[in-house]
Amino acid sequence: MRFGIFYEHQLPRPWDPDSEHRLLKDALEQTEIADRVGFDFVWAVEHHFLEEYSHSSAPDVFLAACSQRTQRIRLGFGILPLPPGYQHPARVAETVATLDLVSDGRVEFGTGETSSGAELEGFGVDRESKREQWDEALDVIVRMMVEEPFAGVDGRFVTMPPRNVVPKPLQKPHPPLWVACSRRETIRLAAQRGIGALSFSFVEPEEAKEWVDEYNAILASDRCVPAGFVVNPRVAVVLPMMCARDDAEAIERGIDGAHFFGYSLAHYYVLGEHRPGRTNLYEEFQRRRDEVGFARDIVTPDLASLRGAIGTPEQIADLCRRYEAAGIDQLIFCSQAGRNRHEHICEALELFGAEVLPEFAARAAEADARRDEQLTDAVAAALVRRKAPRKADKGTVIVTTASGPPPARVGAGAGSAAPEAAPDHEAGSSRIAALQAAAQQRGERVFRAFVQRSGDRSLERTAGSGAGLRLVFAAMAQQFVSEKAKGFSGEIHYELRRTDGSIAPWTVVIENGGASVHPGPADDPVLTLKMTVADFLRIAGQDLDPGAALLTGRLDLEGDFSLAMRLGEMFGQ
């Protein structure tokens, strides 16, 4: 079994002007010690806006600094959030590859979707679709690392033309992949995708064995379809750690930090009501710790659970043997927590490195080789199921004057764009028409992007509201191409079903070469289309093919089938 250290960069209030500077410099010194005494990994998380709990918003910068102050320790992103709202997949691929190059190939690429409301709302990431966003982005990123050039993507959440994403990582085909796991369900997902499982749930050794056994079984089954182009069959567990000569001293030095870690985690992810820049989390922890299960007097003699690896070298060694017997590949220690003192953390790393780590280091390489040998056939079979890197169209040419759509303005509604300059008299109506067409195209692109990045419930609440549907149907009427109707006149009825079972009926009336719309059922429809509100919006936003929806039962037609086949032409794709 191998060992790592983990940083949330916790910084309880009160702060002084030098607090964050001192925090990061101390962490760099601790990492140097860990590298010297034999730790194999340093992990740094990426979080945003989580005051006191995590001041680690730029792990790439911190790990780059670590790379220049260490010799052998591996540098783990633990984790990078992948939903594109946080950062474009190309930026992730470039960042990971650059760190891999400057560190001589020492990067571990941990990924995740995140779940705190502070971050999801702050970056506009839809909670309901974040797992799908992570999955799509991960596939795009690993392809960017191996495809030369990257063949492009036109997905639900990421759209990008072919580009050669450089630099490429030193490790081939790419650094080892991991995913953050706080529940057993995500452990299963890690096995299904052939990537390492980073467990942040402080699981007990005996329970960990059940997780490892299930992980190995899934990895060896047909359910495993690797996310990357190499499999990383590893399971890691995070624990609090403070090592001291005396048990009481270890508890005194480390238990408050471990308890604050647990309390602040619950504050941001489960129970807390946070006021940015106002809530004093550590003060609240001290006041409420007893009532929420973090009392000092509940500390038991047994290690693990929230006590973790807080004890003497002998106690910690015994705990580590239990995790090793359970099949855990790596224990990751979180010592920098709460108000744990820098000098105590340094002493704990030195003592652990001298009296605990050597026993396990002697067995680590052999254990790694044995595990890899046991999984050789399963890994080979899994990689066969993984789609190979693609080849970009050789005819792709980048036009020097090319431009993408302008970024959407947060909170901007219809008609809120900056005013255009008034046309001169010579340009006349042609320039006005061009401006109107450009505005319409921008609106369509923004709508498509919104649909592709939203979950079904979010779509129904927003674009599927009464006002939202009115806008969409009005846009349909404006797009109507009379010659494509081929003389047809009559009513088309849309029966749109909401998640609560209610129906939102809309009618499109085609007559006298034009189209009009109104809410409510049709009197005598020639064609009726039945689907959910979300699927209607996905079809409108080109995120769901109507033919596929029909074949899979998501779209039901009654009436003139041939008319249904012409709707795309009549109202614009």
Image (tube, rainbow, N blue to C red):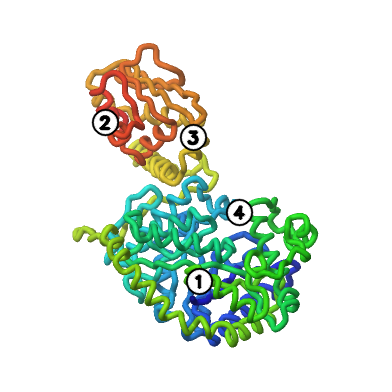
Label 2: state its secondary structure. helix
Residue that appears at 30% across and 31% down: 550
Q: CA distance from mark 2 to mark 4?
A: 43 Å
**Mark with earlier residue (2, 4):** 4
Q: CA distance from mark 1 to mark 2?
A: 65 Å
Nearer mark to the viewer, of 2 and 4: 4
Which of 360/150 is in front? 360
- Report the residue marked by disc 1: 325
- Report the residue marked by disc 3: 460
Nearer mark to the viewer, of 4 and 1: 1
Instruction: Please tell me how crowded label 4 is: few (under 14), some (14-19), or many (20+) other residues with Cα within 10 Å.
Output: some
Name the amino acid type tagged 1: Ala
Q: How many marks?
A: 4
Residue that appears at 53% across and 75% down: 4
The x, y position of residue 245, in whole percent, is 70, 84
- Report the residue marked by disc 4: 118
Residue that appears at 39% across and 32% down: 536
Residues at discs 4 and 3 in contact (Cβ within 8 Å):
no
Label 4: state its secondary structure. helix
